[in-house]
Image: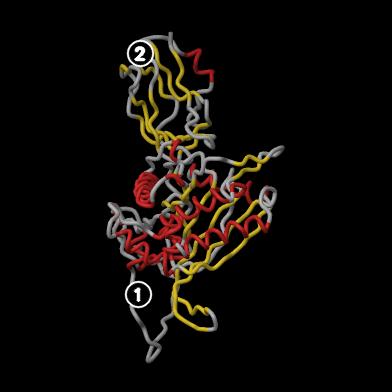
Amino acid sequence: MAEVIRMPKMSDTMTEGVIHTWLKKVGDDIKPGDILAEVETDKATMELENYVKGTLLHIGIPAGGAVPVDAVIAIVGQKGEDFSALLSQGTPTTAEATTKTEAPVVQTPTPVPAAPVAGDNRIKVSPLAKKLAADKGIDINKIPGSGDQGRIVKRDIENFKPQENTLKNLVIPSVTGEEGFEDFPVSQMRKTIARRLTESKIGAPHFYLTMSIIMDKATEARKTMNEFSPVKISMNDIVVKAVAHALQRHPMINASWLGDKIRVNRHIHIGVAVAIDDGLIVPVIKFADSKSVSHISAEVKTLADKAKNKKLQPQEFEGNTFTISNLGMYGIDEFTAIINPPDACILAVGAAKESVIVEKGQMRAGLVMKVTLSCDHRVVDGAMGSAFLQTLKELLENPVKILV
């Protein structure tokens, strides 16, 4: 008897999935354990495993199509079996399934784009590269792309060096052109980011606490650690370890608002925000307080690489009790972050920059890093958040304390 294959719920926040690629075709004999397709969720691209034996009789949605969780996407049965009655159980029609791979609507600007694909005048640029170019005021039409098919990627923006011009004897020509724009379909990940963070910002009463931390000793400790560590330790790895220790001493920061109760977590699972082309994902370092700095470093690198290749599994991005967002590598002095549900707090980490420090009436140069704690006021009060930051400051300014 024929059986339907439905779109499974592959993460706790997934509401619909996109068929990235069908790995089997109609008429193929399949067995339990075979991989039918690759499915793009709101967090990663994952394999859809088959659990029934038979012949793939029907595919209800083409590659690139999106359907809600639990919708019928395929039918498996015996060769020649009549499955028409099963089509009424939710197999989407071509009109109902949205196709993610549909070409965006484009109005082409007059300037010729850099490195176009033959027969296609659209500018190939990743969303992250496009945002970086806009932030830096760089015209992407002047940037040669080094990615696939001439696609402009992040490194092209970072390595771009505009030609220097002077105003002396400069003749400004009149320029005429045609306005243009390019629309991109919203990915499953971006939809989820928009929904969850909007709910967080509106639902949780945020307040913010900022503190400056002198990072001289932490910087020296990192150099010493890297002389012995099997992996290269970053400053963020040290911050993760220090936060884990601080959460042990301030468990109310490691908590969640559940409506009629507050859950204080005894385990410490720290989410580390990672930027990827499609948006932002938060792999989780579980039991971070019981791991060494080098262990944390290796795990962060592994998870970040999997995140950028959309290979994270649900257990690797779920279960966070506290989150860290670090933009220091981009030179950001300080910023505020939106709380990542279900956490009660998130720590925004800026760059460690050389500053003038006054100690006992004497001035000296030193590295100062600013951190900002975003707190859910339903769970955390100002004094409670401040005490946590004081402990974090103590640990980072005397990093030997996180090693004992």
Residue in view at x 35 percent, y 81 percent = 164
- Please tell me in which quadrant of the rendered image residue 403 appears: bottom left
In the picture, the disc for residue 216 is: none
Can the viewer see residue 177 in this picture?
no
Residue in view at x 38 percent, y 87 percent = 166
Q: How is the image coloured?
A: secondary structure
Q: Secondary structure at mark 1?
A: loop
Horizontal arrangement in the rendering, residue 168 relative to residue 9 (left or right): left
Q: Is residue 5 above or below residue 290?
A: above
Residue 215: percent from left, percent from top:
45, 67
Please rate how many residues cluster around mark 2, counting C-alpha atoms within 10 Å: few if below 14, some from 14 to 19, many from 20: some
Q: Is residue 99 above or below residue 117?
A: above
Q: Amino acid at mark 2?
A: Gly
Horizontal arrangement in the rendering, residue 227 relative to residue 22 (left or right): left
Task: Tell me how far mark 1 sits from mark 2, CA to CA.
Answer: 60 Å
Residue underneath mark 1: 162
Mark 1–mark 2 CB contact (< 8 Å): no
* Quarter of the image with the N terminus in it: top left
Residue in view at x 41 percent, y 46 percent = 291
Can the viewer see residue 332 in this picture?
yes
In the picture, the disc for residue 54 is: 2
Please rate how many residues cluster around mark 1, counting C-alpha atoms within 10 Å: few if below 14, some from 14 to 19, many from 20: few
Q: Amino acid at mark 1?
A: Pro
Q: Nearer the viewer, residue 402 or 203?
A: 402
Upstream in sequence: badge 1 or badge 2: 2
Residue 310: percent from left, percent from top:
39, 42
Residue 30: percent from left, percent from top:
32, 18
Horizontal arrangement in the rendering, residue 116 relative to residue 342 (left or right): left
